[in-house]
Amino acid sequence: MNKIEVLAEQADNKNIPQHIAIIMDGNGRWAQLQGKGRVSGHKAGVESVRAVVASARKSNIKALTLFAFSSENWQRPAKEVGVLMDLFMYVLTKEVKRLHKHNIRFQVVGDLSRFSDKLQKNIAKSEQLTADNTGLVLSIAANYGGRWDIVQAAKKLASDVKQGTMTLDDINEESLNEQTCLADLPTLDLLIRTGGDYRISNFLLWQAAYAELYFTDTLWPDFNEMQFLEAISCFDHRERRFGKTGEQARNAKI
C-alpha cells in the first residue's frame, strides 16, 4: 500500500472537512523555475485542479471552492490575463462534461459582469448542465474578492430595507450570510494556500471566520492528491474550539 492509499484509508476514519477552499498560488513561479513563461504554469496548474477535485470527490467532501481569479488579478499583464480567460473557457467547454459525468455540481461565484458575453453564456450553460447533480459542489471563484462579497451582501440587505421587505432589526449575521456567494454550502472548514505565502489575499473573508488555515510551500502545479490528503490529515489533528475552552470543546465531542 503506497502513501496515498494509506492517507486515503486513514481519511475514511477521520473528521473530514465538509467544505474546503484553496488559494491556488505559485503557477508563475513554478514556470519560472522551469525556465518557461508564466502562462505555462497556469496550464500546468489545471492538472492539479483535476487531481484535487478527484480526491475531494473520493473523500466524500461536500464542497470545494477554488480561487481562480481575484478582482485584483486584472492588474496582471494583458497576455497573462488573456491566457487565464482562455483556460477558463477551456474548462467550461471540456472539463465540465467530465464533472457532470461524476455527479459534480459546478458553479462560478464572483462579479461576472466584467467577463465577455461569450464567457458569461458558457458559465450559465455549464451551471445549468450540472444544476441537478447531488455530489461534490465545485465552486470557482472568478473576479471574486472577499470585501466585494460582503459589500454586495450589504447592498442586498439595504435594498430590502428600502423596499420595506425587512427592517434594520432583521439584519444580523444570519441574514447577511444568506446574501453571500456561498450561502447554500456548508460552513467553510479548511482554507488551504499553496505557494509559500501566509495570507488569505481577500478570499472568503466572511466565510473563513472560523476556518482552519493550512499553508504549504508547495507551488500549485506540484500540489497533488497526496498533499491534499495530508492537509485533510492535518485538519483532523486541529482542536476546533469556536470560542470555548479546550476542555469544553473536547467534552462536546463525547
Image: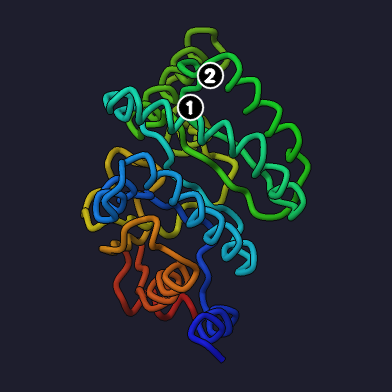
Q: What mark, if any, has residue 166 been given in the picture?
A: 2
Q: Nearer the viewer, residue 38 or 176?
A: 38
User: Which amino acid type is marked by label 2?
Assistant: Met
Seen in the picture, residue 101 relative to 89 is either above or below; the reply is below
User: Helix, strand, or loop for circle 1?
Assistant: helix
Q: Nearer the viewer, residue 248 or 13?
A: 13
User: Helix, strand, or loop for circle 2?
Assistant: loop
Residue at x 37%, y 47% (from the top left corner): 41
State the count of labels: 2
The spot of residue 157 in percent (x, y) is 47, 20
Q: Are marks 2 and 1 in contact (CB under 8 Å)?
A: yes
Residue at x 43%, y 76% (from the top left corner): 233
Residue at x 74%, y 32% (from the top left corner): 128
Seen in the picture, residue 5 relative to 112 is either above or below; the reply is below
Q: Is residue 189 left or right of residue 139?
A: left
Residue sticking out furthest to the bottom? 1
User: Marks 2/1: CA distance?
Assistant: 6 Å
Tell me where residue 117 sits by quadrant: top right
Seen in the picture, residue 21 relative to 10 is either above or below; the reply is above
The spot of residue 253 in percent (x, y) is 48, 78
Residue at x 42%, y 59% (from the top left corner): 190
Residue ID for mark 1: 170
Q: What mark, if any, has residue 104 been given in the picture?
A: none
Tell me where residue 205 sits by quadrant: top left
The spot of residue 49 in percent (x, y) is 51, 53
Q: How is the image coloured?
A: rainbow
Q: Is residue 178 left or right of residue 70?
A: right
Callout 2: 10 Å neighbours few (<14), some, many (20+)? some
Q: Nearer the viewer, residue 188 or 195?
A: 195
